[in-house]
Each structure stands twice: as structure tokens, then as C-alpha cells.
Amino acid sequence: MRFRPLSLIAAVTALALASPPAAATAQTDRAFTPRTVTGTVTQIRHADELTLGTLHIRLEGIAAPRLGKPLGAEAVFHMNGIAFRKRVVCRLTGGRFGDAEVGTCRVNGKDLARSLIRAGLARSCPRLGLRRYGFYENAARNTGIAQVFSLPAYCGADPRRTHPNAAP
């Protein structure tokens, strides 16, 4: 049998072109495992996202305004006060949101997402938590967050826009 280097190169090239790059596969196919993690918050990425070392976590069930938007700075400031450089326990669901794993996090037994909603600095996001925090959002409506922060499209329908008695 005679060795043909061009045939080998052609076969390797065809295989490489037929397979998605490893990085793309990792981004789209990677499934996280539900688990509990404990650590110190090293960064508040957004009011609803935090970092424990290299692990990015998106709080389940809420959406908070980003910096530069109404209440965005206040929400991040609140989260910094209750979580930054504190020890948290997070129960990760196994889901993901962008580059972050999704979960509920607690500092000294207090749910961080619940704290943001009760302070009027985040809203319940039905698609990210099965209306887990809807009751607390109703209690915080007098803060005005529903008037200045519409739910992002990924949360589903904004109840104040579909309710017949909602203000325009």
C-alpha cells in the first residue's frame, strides 16, 4: 500500500470542515449540572448577576435594570451592599443564561433576588423562575419600578401591558 500525503491532508481537512469548532460546541451543547456552590462574591456584574471567582451566576426568577437605565445604579448599589465580598450559598438549577449558570443565592439565609424585588429594584421574570417572586413584586409596586422598567422580552409578557386596568 502506497502512502498518499495529499489524500491524508484532504481527509483531515474534510473532517475539520464537517465538525463544528470545539468552542462552538461547548457554547451550545454544554449542560450544567444542578448543584450547590458556596463562595465569596468577587464581582457584581449586574444587579441580577454575580461572580464567585470564575463562576458567573444569574439570579433565577428576576430581571433588574442595567446600569445607565432608571434604577440600574440603585439596584447594583443595593446588591453590592448585601452581597459583595460576602459568603453566599447558591443552588444552581443546571440552566444557563448567556455565560452564566442560573440559580438562587443566599447570604446568611436571605434570598438575594427576593431582597432586590422587595426593595423595588428588580421585577419577577416568569420565564426564569416560574413566578417564584411574583408575590414580593406585588408588595413592592409602590416603588414605581413597573413604571420605569419594562420586563425584557426573554421574561415573557409584561403583565402591566396586558392587564385591562394597566396604565398606558
Image (cartoon, rainbow, N blue to C red):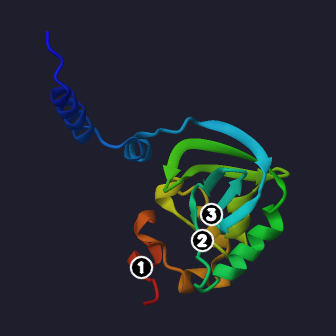
Q: Which residue is mark 3?
A: 135
Tell me the residue at 27%/38% (across/down). 16
Q: CA distance from mark 2 to mark 1?
A: 18 Å
**Is residue 148 shown above or below 11?**
below
Is 36 on the left-hand or right-hand side of 153? right
Q: Secondary structure at mark 2?
A: loop
Q: Nearer the viewer, mark 2 or mark 1?
A: 2
Please provide percent x and percent y for residue 97: 50, 55
Q: Nearer the viewer, mark 2 or mark 3?
A: 2
Image quarter hosting the C terminus: bottom left
Question: Which numbered disc flags the more N-terminal residue, 2 or 3?
Answer: 2
Amino acid residing under circle 1? Arg
Question: Which numbered disc flags the more N-terminal residue, 2 or 1?
Answer: 2
**Dot 3, crowdedness within 10 Å: few (<14), some or many (≥20)?**
few
Q: Which residue is mark 1?
A: 161
Please provide percent x and percent y for residue 128: 51, 56
Amino acid residing under circle 3? Phe
**Is residue 74 shown above or below 86?**
below
Are the residues flagged by discs 2 and 1 in contact, CB closer than 8 Å?
no
Q: CA distance from mark 3 to mark 1?
A: 18 Å
Q: CA distance from mark 2 to mark 3?
A: 16 Å
Q: Residue furthest front?
A: 2
Please provide percent x and percent y for residue 117: 67, 68
User: Can you tell which mark lies on residue 48?
Assistant: none
Q: Between residues 99 and 83, which one lies in front from this camera angle?
A: 99
Q: Residue furthest bottom?
A: 168
